[in-house]
């Protein structure tokens, strides 16, 4: 069976089901809200696997599912070697979000990553420790800041509301996913003018590590149904 992993709950699940339904593929949860089983009609030989969006990158990398729907931010954060593990099949046009760097509004002279770099060096000189940036996206933030030459900082792991860490005095700046910026404004934060580290959206990914042998019929039928040229490259 060809296994398709989709988000198990929330807006992302609803939008994913709607997206496939418009292309003639009906995804349906077969158990209760606490069960993670489902069915697919429209193409035979495909099994629906319901997972959290954060689990899907790992399952793709390990080859336990053939296809998966999740955000590009989660793929790039959780799979540093994603080029060798997965292939993007199609961007889905929803679930848009940006990974951004934001600082307090009162930092009136800090409007770019170049400004942040200068402030970080000054901060360490004055306080004796590096400027703290709270985030859940350590790999992406390190890579993004390295590309801009920002070095004098430390990342603080944020498992709760990242935007609140500045007010709570556990960080001086944040790096987080945002879609509208409303939460930033509510917490008196501003995004740097060049502070978008990644633009993310929901996408269909194919695993390069899954066993695709014996699945030619399912692949061909699915590609024909979805208008895809191929699933793996």
Image (tube, grey):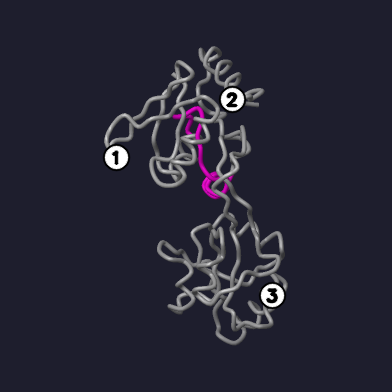
Q: Return the residue nearer the eye: 232 or 182.
A: 182
How far apart, in angstroms, are the residues tagged by discs 2 and 1?
A: 28 Å
Foreground pick, 56 / 211 = 56
Q: Is residue 12 left or right of residue 198?
A: left
If the image is split into quadrants, where does the N terminus sit? top left
Question: In this picture, is 72 found above or below 192?
Answer: above
Residue 175 at x, y percent in the picture: 56, 64
Check if residue 213 falls in the magenta segment.
no
Kindly check if marks 2 and 1 are in contact, taking CB atoms under 8 A apart as contact. Answer: no
Q: Residue under circle 2?
A: 226
Q: Residues within 10 Å of mark 1 (few under 14, many from 20)?
A: few
Helix, strand or loop at mark 3: loop
Q: Quadrant of residue 202?
A: top right
Q: Which residue is mark 3?
A: 111
Residue 145, x across and y down, in percent: 65, 63
- At 46% across and 29% down in the image, what residue appears? 4
Q: Which mark is residue 87?
A: none
Question: 131 or 89, which lies in front?
Answer: 89
Place of residue 220 in the rendered image (x, y in percent of width and height, measured from the top left):
58, 16
Q: Depth-wise, is mark 3 or mark 1 nearer the camera?
A: 1
Tag 1, which secondary structure? Answer: loop
Badge 2 crowding class, 10 Å Cα cut-off, few under 14, some 14 to 19, many 20 or more, is: some
Segment tinted magenta in the rendering? 62-80
176 above or below 229? below
Mark 3 Cα shell of 10 Å, populated few (<14), some (14-19), many (≥20): some
- x and y, in percent, of residue 177 in the image: 54, 58
Q: Earlier in the sequence, mark 3 or mark 1?
A: 1
Residue that mark 1 sits on: 33
Q: Residue at x 48, y 69 (%)?
A: 163
């Amino acid at each position: 069976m060809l296994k398709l992993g989709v988000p198990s709950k929330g807006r992302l699940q609803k939008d994913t089901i709607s997206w496939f339904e418009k292309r003639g593929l009906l995804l349906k949860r077969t158990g209760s809200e606490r069960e993670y089983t489902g069915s697919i009609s429209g193409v035979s030989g495909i099994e629906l696997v319901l997972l959290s969006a954060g689990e899907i990158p790992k399952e793709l990398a390990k080859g336990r599912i053939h296809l998966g729907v999740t955000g590009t931010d989660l793929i790039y954060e959780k799979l540093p070697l994603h080029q060798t593990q997965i292939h993007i099949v199609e961007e889905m046009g929803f679930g848009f979000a940006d990974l951004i760097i934001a600082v307090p509004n009162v930092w009136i002279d800090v409007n770019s990553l170049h400004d942040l770099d200068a402030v970080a060096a000054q901060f360490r000189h004055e306080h004796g420790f590096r400027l703290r940036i709270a985030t859940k996206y350590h790999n992406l933030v390190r890579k993004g800041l390295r590309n801009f030459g920002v070095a004098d900082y430390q990342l603080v792991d944020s498992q709760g509301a990242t935007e609140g860490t500045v007010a709570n005095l556990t960080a001086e700046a944040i790096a987080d996913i945002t879609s509208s910026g409303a939460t930033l404004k509510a917490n008196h934060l501003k995004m740097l003018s060049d502070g978008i580290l990644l633009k993310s959206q929901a996408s269909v990914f194919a695993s390069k590590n899954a066993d695709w042998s014996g699945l030619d019929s399912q692949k061909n039928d699915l590609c024909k149904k979805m208008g895809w040229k191929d699933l793996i490259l």
